[in-house]
Image: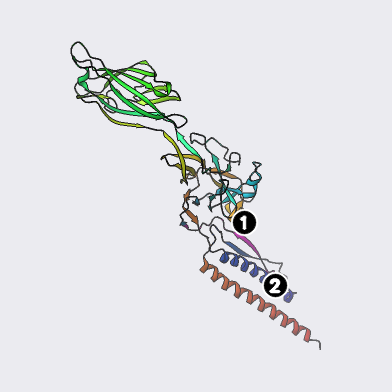
Amino acid sequence: MTISSSLNASVAGLASNATRLATISDNIANASTYGYKRAVTDFHSMVTENGRGGYSAGGVRTTSTRLIDQRGSLVSTSNPTDLAVRGRGMLPVTTEASVAVGNGENPLLLSTTGSFRADDQGYLRSPGGLVLMGWPANADGSIPTFPRDSVDGLEPIQINSNQFAGEATTIMDLAVNLPATATENGAAGDEEVLSLEYYDNLGKSATLNVTFTPTVPATGSSNEWTMTVSDSASGGAIVGEYTLQFDDTRGAGGTLQSVTAVSGGAYDPATGSIAVNVDGGPIEIGIGELGEANGLTQLSDAFAPVSISKNGTSVGSLTGIEVDPNGFVRASFDTGINRVLYQIPLIDVSNVNGLESLDQQSYRVTPDSGTFFMWDAGDGPTGDIISYAREESSTDVAAELTQLIQTQRAYSSNAKVIQTVDEMLQETTNIKR
């Protein structure tokens, strides 16, 4: 019985070391595979009941585990949609086949890195057929509220390279100096005209004509102007008229003292702005706070538009796609604007090593891994997303070769035990001759 158990234990040793050899071979073969997670084989002794005066060998068994929580080094690339996760968390991806079916049911797979490029339909797809997923943004670039423990809301990221985009003008800030001499007795009362270009909701150019008319008094100085705003898109109609009173006291001279609305939106002293309704909607015009020299002023004898700033752009063509560290997919246009199209969340589970390993360095949630939760990149326990980067294999070739030598020696030793047991059994057979 003892000799027989030795034989069985050595056979188990051969099988166990063969399993370890398989994991080492896989690790070495994938030493250059981006995102590969090395596999390890652990040995566990099997103990049988010991009888009096004898010992029975139990042998050995193995368990193989893929160390998904071990991360490889990040290397830089030249593709803006080469992505890698720096820290905890994984990218949501799905299969190319499920996207092609188009029934909206895309299985959730996870990956720590990927080289994603737009295919013929605009989907960001890896060479192995994994399609990146994210939450779609609203038209204004904001991300709606989606459930964090469900795939509802996630959809394959699709980029239309032929799309155009414009941004309507909603805010203007004016810093203009009006001549103080124009409101003195005997002044000519000439109007000062300022034309402001803006873009409507369709990206078309329109003009706000702002006319400043001084109030010329019979004596002294009035320090008063009438500001009239007309809109070219509304057929030149006046969309706002305001009476501006400037301060002439020491220290505050030349700053706005009061703004009275004759027509149009009321003046907001907290923000120093007025709102006028043009053909496409309201535009907020900042003219400065009362007592502050950060907007309209009345000084000296010269009309001077110091600065005019505004948002909005004309229609532009898509020039590039980038992903920022927080997972926002931004489209850049040749007019200088960028727009958020999607947000890529990072998915975390309780036991990363409990995920099921699939092809193309992708993984699937299992009961052993625990339920998943979607985090904003850089929030909670998760890291951030690095573009222009790939994650290298976690294989250490030198360590694997060292283990290969150990495995070879262990295998040879087990084979030697089997040879010895065979010789001992032969001696037992030779007793009767």
Secondary structure of the residue carrying numbered label 2: helix
Classify 73 as above or below 281: below
Secondary structure of the residue carrying numbered label 1: helix
- What stretch of residues is rendered in magenta? 49-74
Q: Residue at x 78, y 84 (%)?
A: 429
Q: Residue at x 48, y 34 (%)?
A: 140
Q: Locate residue 287, reporting x and y percent.
A: 32, 25
In the picture, measured across the screen, residue 23 lies left or right of residue 331, that is right
Asked where in the image residue 25 lies, by quadrant, the reply is: bottom right
**Marks 2/1: CA–CA distance:** 32 Å
Classify 142 as above or below 31: above
Q: Locate residue 216, reporting x and y percent.
A: 23, 14
Classify 323 as above or below 392: above
- The residue at which mark 2 appears reads as 11
- The residue at which mark 1 appears reads as 359
Amino acid type at mark 1: Asp
Marker disc for residue 329 = none
Q: Locate residue 91, reporting x and y percent.
A: 54, 48
In the picture, measured across the screen, residue 280 lies left or right of residue 352, that is left
